[in-house]
Image: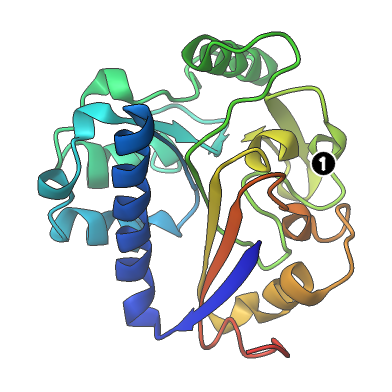
Amino acid sequence: MAAVQILEEKALFPRLAEEFVTCAKKAISQRGRFTVALSGGSTPVRFYQALVEGGLASKVDLSKVYFFFGDERDVSPESERSNYRLARDLFFKPLSVPSSNVIRWMTEIIDAKEVAVKYEQSLRRFFELKPGEFPVFDLVLLGLGDDCHTASLFPNTDALKVTDRIAVMNRVEILDSNRLTLTFPVINSARKIIFAVTGPEKAEALKEAVEGERNCSRFPAGCVKPTDGELVWLADKDAAALLKKK
């Protein structure tokens, strides 16, 4: 099940915040906790602001919310480029989220492959997984690159083909860097996945991901297809300009 919602840019992140609150309340009511994988890059900034300004702490019991990261850069957690630091400074600290409820990539470890192994181990412990099982997040939040990458699943990279791992180091030659990312099987196991996409520079990528033929190597975001969950695309008018089905 997939849906595309086209909104004014100023309304998109408040809507995403509303979706977060709705998912959180439902998960806590049904299972006693809410697990969410946050997106990286620049997409979350206005989302975090919407949550903080919207009084999230008064709407959701944050002691029952557990935060993970769909991907991370191979940088110190204190780096300005760290997805964790962004969330910490703009979201966790302002809302006094318990540190025990934040499960991050331990990027202070020098070896990126070891960071991925440690994160996979953390997820296996948290979700009490048996061999071969994947975690089921209540919500996975994703952004979209203008090259159609999502999380750190970039076109023509090795991680796109991984089917037996939860978390991997992904070498991205075009950026000359290592990235850390959850894999397709994990993302697609989520109960709900929401993309937030803004700007005219994302229009081609959004069209390929939503309406194009499935080609994971060239257009990774198009291969985000929940196995038993819901997929929602939130897009502003600029990003959705090339979609045929409005």
Q: Is residue 100 visible?
A: yes
Q: Position of residue 192 (x, y in %)?
A: 53, 49
Q: Quadrant of residue 26?
A: top left
Q: Identify the amino acid type marked 1.
A: Leu
Circle 1: element type: helix
The answer to which of 234 and 2 lies nearer the viewer is 2
148 relative to 112, above or below = below
Q: Which residue is depicted at the point 64% across and 35% down?
A: 181
Q: Which residue is depicted at the point 33% across and 29% down?
A: 33
Q: How is the image coloured?
A: rainbow
Q: Which residue is depicted at the point 68% across and 49% down?
A: 226
Q: Which residue is depicted at the point 87% across and 59% down?
A: 218
Q: Position of residue 209 (x, y in %)?
A: 74, 67
The answer to which of 110 and 132 lies nearer the viewer is 132
In the displayed orientation, state which residue is furthest to the front.
Answer: 30
Q: Position of residue 101 (x, y in %)?
A: 31, 23
Local crowd size for mark 1, using a 10 Å CA cut-off: few (<14), some (14–19), many (≥20): some
Residue matched to label 1: 160
116 relative to 33, above or below = above
Q: Is residue 78 visible?
A: no
